[in-house]
């Protein structure tokens, strides 16, 4: 039995190893996805390559279960353990809005048309104090700069990072950006920020990219120059697939950036209306194109039972330009559950955002059930369509096919 991805610690603590009972017939259960001898166990998060000599070990590691046994209860236990474990951890990740202003104008952006709010120097100082007071000294503090376009107010990025550095706190940062203001960023600032990665969203190439982003002419070429200028920063391209435009724009993006050693990519669907299985098949084709170019960020699925996002856990603090704390970075103008200025937290807001959609009749038999939870208030995570299930399962199968 050759392990490709180790079993996650959450399932070890929740259900341990299975005891072999003589005379019992053991079979593969509904939470197994197999391609040839490569097997993904959604119950435990483990991926292994197996053969006929591994029967006993497959039982111990829950790849096989007694025939007729309903494992839904065990799946639920692993999910509950994931929540308990992650929600008990200290906050070590901060999503900080330097501003809700932006130099671009993407029509599909969740902040499109909102009045901009800019973090002040005083608020930045207060954010620094909040992090120093709440962060675990023994853990790396991870910061994600968000917006709007965070570089329209890069001064507060430097201010916060300098405070952490002067306090000798270990930190690193990442950023979501459109990249067009990087010509104002110096190597010294990147070093101060401990900037490891930048996510950029691309919908097209050339002048069409400029138009969609609402950026000055030549933005696409400036973006390419930025990536070349910072070879030690990993640029992650979120490549949008629009079914109305087909796969060609995405393939052109892959072709343009496949020669950049500091670029990886992943494909994402524009969530405008219901998508069909055929739409997701095209998304898979784009991912295959990325894989062939050696640019796909990750082929294997997330092995840990999902705490889906920051609204579902307590390890991340999302801080607005005014110092409010919000459950989700995509609802920064909505309700907050507290502030960096007080210790009071509105538990009713947190509970409402973490509320799960009740299991449907088909959920317990779905291969993804142990690692899938849908959140009521999330416009993307709250949807589980037939096409999306097909996409997730097929993506795992294609990944398994590549590990044999």
Image (cartoon, grey):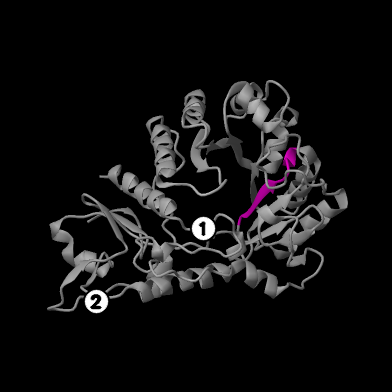
Front residue of 398 and 321: 398
The image quadrant of residue 341 is bottom right
Q: Which percent across, then down, holds residue 302?
A: 43, 54
In the displayed structure, would residue 63 be above or below residue 222? Answer: below
Gap in angstroms between the C-alphas marked 2 and 1 = 37 Å
Front residue of 169 and 13: 13
Mark found first going from the N terminus, 2 or 1: 2
Element on which disc 1 rests: loop
Q: Work out whether residue 260 can be spotted.
A: no
In the displayed structure, would residue 144 be above or below residue 294? Answer: below
Circle 2 packing at 10 Å, graded few (<14), some (14-19), many (20+), is few
Residue 128, magenta (yes or no): no
Q: Which percent across, then down, holds residue 255?
A: 47, 24
Q: Which percent across, then down, holds residue 187?
A: 69, 31
What segment carries the magenta color?
A: 140-151
**Residue behind mark 2:** 19
Element on which disc 2 rests: loop
Which residue sits at x=86%, y=48%?
Answer: 121
Front residue of 347 and 392: 392
Q: Work out whether residue 319 can be spotted.
A: yes
Checking the image for residue 383, the label placed there is 1
Q: How many marks?
A: 2
In the picture, the quarter occupied by the N terminus is bottom left
């Amino acid at each position: 039995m050759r392990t490709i991805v180790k079993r996650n610690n959450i399932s070890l603590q929740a259900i341990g190893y299975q005891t072999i009972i003589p005379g019992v017939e053991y079979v593969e259960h509904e939470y197994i996805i197999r391609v040839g001898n490569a097997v993904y166990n959604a119950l435990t998060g483990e991926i292994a390559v197996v053969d006929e000599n591994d029967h006993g070990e497959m039982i111990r590691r829950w790849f096989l279960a007694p025939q007729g046994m309903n494992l839904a209860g065990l799946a639920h236990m692993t999910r509950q353990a994931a929540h308990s474990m992650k929600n008990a951890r200290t906050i070590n990740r901060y999503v900080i809005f330097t501003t809700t202003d932006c130099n671009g104008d993407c029509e599909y952006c969740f902040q499109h048309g909102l009045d901009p709010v800019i973090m002040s120097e005083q608020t930045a100082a207060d954010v620094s104090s909040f992090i120093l007071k709440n962060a675990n000294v023994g853990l790396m503090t991870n910061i994600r700069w968000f917006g709007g376009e965070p570089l329209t107010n890069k001064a507060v990025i430097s201010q916060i990072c300098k405070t952490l550095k002067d306090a000798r706190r270990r930190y690193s940062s990442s950023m979501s950006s459109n990249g067009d203001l990087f010509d104002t960023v110096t190597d010294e600032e990147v070093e101060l920020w401990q900037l490891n990665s930048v996510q950029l969203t691309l919908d097209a190439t050339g002048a069409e990219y400029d138009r969609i982003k609402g950026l000055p002419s030549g933005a696409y070429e400036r973006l390419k120059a930025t990536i070349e200028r910072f070879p030690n920063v990993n640029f992650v391209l979120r490549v949008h697939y629009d079914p109305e435009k087909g796969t060609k724009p995405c393939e052109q993006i892959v072709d343009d950036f496949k020669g950049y050693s500091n670029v990886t990519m992943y494909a994402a669907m524009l969530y405008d209306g219901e998508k069909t299985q055929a739409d997701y098949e095209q998304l898979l084709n784009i991912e295959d194109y990325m894989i062939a170019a050696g640019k796909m960020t990750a082929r294997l699925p997330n092995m840990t039972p999902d705490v889906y996002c920051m609204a579902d856990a307590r390890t991340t603090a999302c801080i607005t330009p005014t110092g409010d704390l919000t459950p989700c970075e995509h609802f920064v103008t909505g309700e907050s559950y507290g502030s960096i200025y007080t210790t009071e937290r509105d538990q009713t807001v947190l509970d409402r955002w973490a509320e799960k959609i009740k299991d449907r009749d088909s959920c317990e038999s779905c291969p993804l059930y142990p690692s899938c939870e849908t959140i009521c208030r999330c416009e993307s995570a709250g949807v589980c369509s037939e096409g999306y299930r097909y996409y997730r399962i097929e993506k795992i199968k294609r990944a398994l096919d590549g590990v044999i």
